[in-house]
């Protein structure tokens, strides 16, 4: 079991099984647990820095999409690929505990994709992303969109080497999610409030949700979108263009 998040240690990339690289605590008291957690995160952070340098050396924008299950990450990616794929090379890493259902959807949408299955693990880590990148092989100047496992807890702790964490927050979830899961929303560089086409049909107060977000993160960009209808997606695409340009500028500095 992972000392940091409680998940067990299985991971698989495609059809190849990999260890989850998390040590297993052996009941030595709270102090030992904290020490193990620190070692886990330190090891992950070192791998994340390696990923970050790899992305930077190739002018690649890498972003980490996180959300609760069912918030609409995969639909958002499908729409993004359809609308933006001709403008910039988009590559996807799909993280799920099991199956390749979402990877198949991304492939049909027209983007190269690698499925990373974590077994009973509740998040991607930097080593999994590194192995995924070895198979994905994005070209110089590409944008890599990493769809993390649907979970508002564990992915907040694990840096993947991304340029930004993107929280996809659905109007079907309730306005209180930012204050219930502050670590995730605090880590966000941008929050996409998705499924706004459903606002007439759900009890969701946008102003209250944004106020809750601002109580934990005053700096994150926010964009209201509907991946189904396309509302607000132009602003999301502009954000991606800006971040890709920033990544390329940083690589040449």
Image (spheres, rainbow, N blue to C red):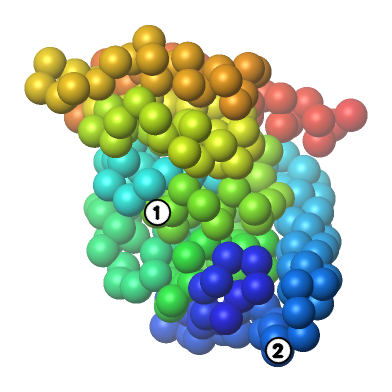
The image quadrant that residue 164 belongs to is top right
Q: Is residue 44 left or right of residue 77?
A: right
In this rendering, does residue 233 appear at all? no
Would you place residue 213 above or below residue 251 in this image? above
Q: Which residue is mark 1?
A: 150
Q: Residue at x 68, y 38 (%)?
A: 163
Q: Quadrant of the N terminus?
A: bottom right
In the rendered structure, which disc, 1 or 2, sits on the residue that comes first in sequence?
A: 2
At label 1, counting other C-alpha atoms closer than 10 Å, the crowd grade (few under 14, some 14-19, many 20 or more) is many
The image quadrant that residue 187 belongs to is top right
Q: Nearer the viewer, residue 171 or 79?
A: 171
Q: Residue at x 51, y 52 (%)?
A: 153
The image quadrant that residue 2 belongs to is bottom right
Q: Is residue 152 left or right of residue 9?
A: left
Q: Which residue is mark 2?
A: 26
Q: Position of residue 242 (x, y in %)?
A: 61, 20
């Amino acid at each position: 079991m992972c000392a940091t998040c409680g998940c067990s240690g299985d991971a698989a990339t495609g059809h190849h099984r990999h260890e989850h690289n998390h040590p297993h605590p052996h009941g030595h008291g709270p102090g030992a647990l904290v020490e193990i957690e620190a070692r886990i995160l330190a090891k992950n952070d070192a791998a994340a820095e390696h990923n970050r340098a790899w992305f930077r050396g190739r002018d690649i924008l890498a972003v980490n999409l996180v959300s609760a299950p069912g918030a609409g990450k995969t639909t958002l990616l499908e729409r993004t690929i359809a609308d933006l794929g001709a403008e910039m090379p988009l590559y996807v890493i799909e993280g799920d505990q099991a199956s390749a259902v979402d990877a198949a959807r991304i492939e049909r949408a027209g983007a190269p994709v690698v499925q990373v299955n974590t077994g009973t693990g509740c998040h991607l880590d930097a080593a999994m992303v590194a192995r995924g990148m070895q198979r994905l092989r994005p070209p110089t100047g590409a944008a890599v969109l990493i769809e993390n496992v649907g979970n508002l807890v564990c992915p907040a702790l694990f840096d993947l080497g991304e340029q930004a964490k993107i929280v996809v927050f659905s109007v079907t979830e309730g306005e209180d999610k930012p204050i219930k899961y502050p670590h995730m929303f605090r880590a966000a560089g941008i929050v996409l409030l998705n499924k706004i086409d459903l606002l007439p049909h759900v009890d969701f107060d946008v102003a209250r949700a944004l106020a809750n977000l601002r109580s934990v993160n005053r700096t994150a960009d926010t964009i209201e979108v509907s991946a189904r209808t396309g509302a607000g997606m132009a602003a999301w695409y502009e954000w991606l263009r800006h971040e890709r340009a920033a990544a390329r500028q940083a690589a040449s500095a």
